[in-house]
Image: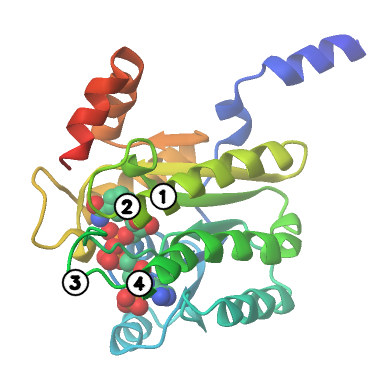
Amino acid sequence: MILTLAVAKLTREPSEMSRISLNSKHIVLTGGTSGIGYEIIRQLNSNNRLSVIARASTRLDALKAEFPKLRVYEADLGNLEAVKRAADEIVQSGDAIDILINNAAVQHTPLFLDEDFRLETIEREIDINLTAPAILIYLTLPALLASKRATVLNINSGLALVPKTSSAVYCAAKGGLNILSQSLANQFEYSTVRVVQAFLPLVDTEMTKGRGTGKISAAHAATKVLQGLETGAETINIGKVKLLRLMMRLSPSLARKIMRKG
Ligand SMILES: NC(=O)c1ccc[n+]([C@@H]2O[C@H](COP(=O)([O-])OP(=O)(O)OC[C@H]3O[C@@H](n4cnc5c(N)ncnc54)[C@H](OP(=O)(O)O)[C@@H]3O)[C@@H](O)[C@H]2O)c1
């Protein structure tokens, strides 16, 4: 009997175990003033309790005015002390976190060889895109573990899998986020916390303004992310990322060649 249960535990479909209903959840999200994060808030706000960690700005004021129920924790994610304070405040509120969505990120496109490359962007991009998510996951663990079943959702990119030529630090930080997510998924395997990643293709947001073609809308990207979350998938591949993964298996060199032009 015990052996049967053990085998059943090992062989059961993760998606069956981990389907999530996006109702009555406490969801903490970084960013949210624009793009995919904003669309996630728009789609989840009426049925869930949302907290956002975002930096002070007129856009944040507009977000609060549009969604008065939002709980807002102000922090510039490039300021790691502010990130720690926001995480502590959330934990001290005593409210369990059901879903933590690490969404906010920045991308600087200049090449290292370009005149307009700025040294200070290296540290800031890594802090916002990789260090802040790691700190938030670690410091909010008490609140995540207080939920019956919690999910950490890291918003990632196809560029974490194969880099393009520009935005080297962004690609590296997203690659780091991918490895961090996989390693933490291992660490939390026997806990009530799951780590999920959504890999997005090019999305039409401020991040990609004025560049790229064949972009999907932010609303569509958010819908796909949330549908993936609901199915319980550990890895949510959206749109052309599915093709990229196939190409990486069939011809890694072709995948690199195509992506480097991106
Ligand atoms: N767009 C794409 O093609 C694409 C593709 C793959 C993955 N992604 C990922 O999708 C996620 C969302 O990006 P997006 O495309 O929606 O970009 P976006 O429209 O530029 O939104 C970025 C969000 O991050 C916030 N943010 C930036 N710097 C911050 C800081 N220092 N402190 C706090 N918040 C900060 C912004 O808030 P402010 O109002 O404070 O600036 C904004 O809400 C990111 O993780 C990105 O890497 C995007």
Labels 1 & 2 near each other (Cβ < 8 A): yes
Q: Amino acid at mark 1?
A: Ala
Q: Is residue 153 visible?
A: yes
Q: Quadrant of the N terminus?
A: top right
Would residue 46 be found to the left or right of residue 252 on screen?
right
Task: Tell me which numbered mark, 1 or 3, is placed earlier along the sequence.
Answer: 3
Residue drawn 45% across the image and 69% down it: 123
Q: Amino acid at mark 4?
A: Leu
- Which label belongs to residue 119? 4
Labels 4 & 1 near each other (Cβ < 8 A): no
Q: Amino acid at mark 2?
A: Ala
Residue drawn 57% across the image and 82% down it: 82
Between residue 69 and residue 127, name the one nearer to us: 127
Q: CA distance from mark 4 to mark 1?
A: 16 Å
Determine the secondary structure under disc 2: helix
Disc 4 residue crowd, few under 14, some 14–19, many 20+, Cα 10 Å? few
Q: CA distance from mark 4 to mark 2?
A: 13 Å
Disc 2 residue crowd, few under 14, some 14–19, many 20+, Cα 10 Å? some
| Residue marked by disc 3 | 116
Determine the secondary structure under disc 3: loop
| Residue marked by disc 1 | 172
Between residue 157 and residue 163, name the one nearer to us: 163
Task: Tell me which numbered mark, 4 or 1, is placed earlier along the sequence.
Answer: 4
Residue drawn 66% across the image and 81% down it: 89
Residue 126 higher or lower than 9, as above or below: below
- Which label belongs to residue 221? none
Q: CA distance from mark 3 to mark 2?
A: 15 Å
Tell me if the residue at label 1 has its CB under 8 Å from ligand 1: no
Q: CA distance from mark 1 to mark 2?
A: 6 Å
Between residue 84 and residue 41, name the one nearer to us: 84
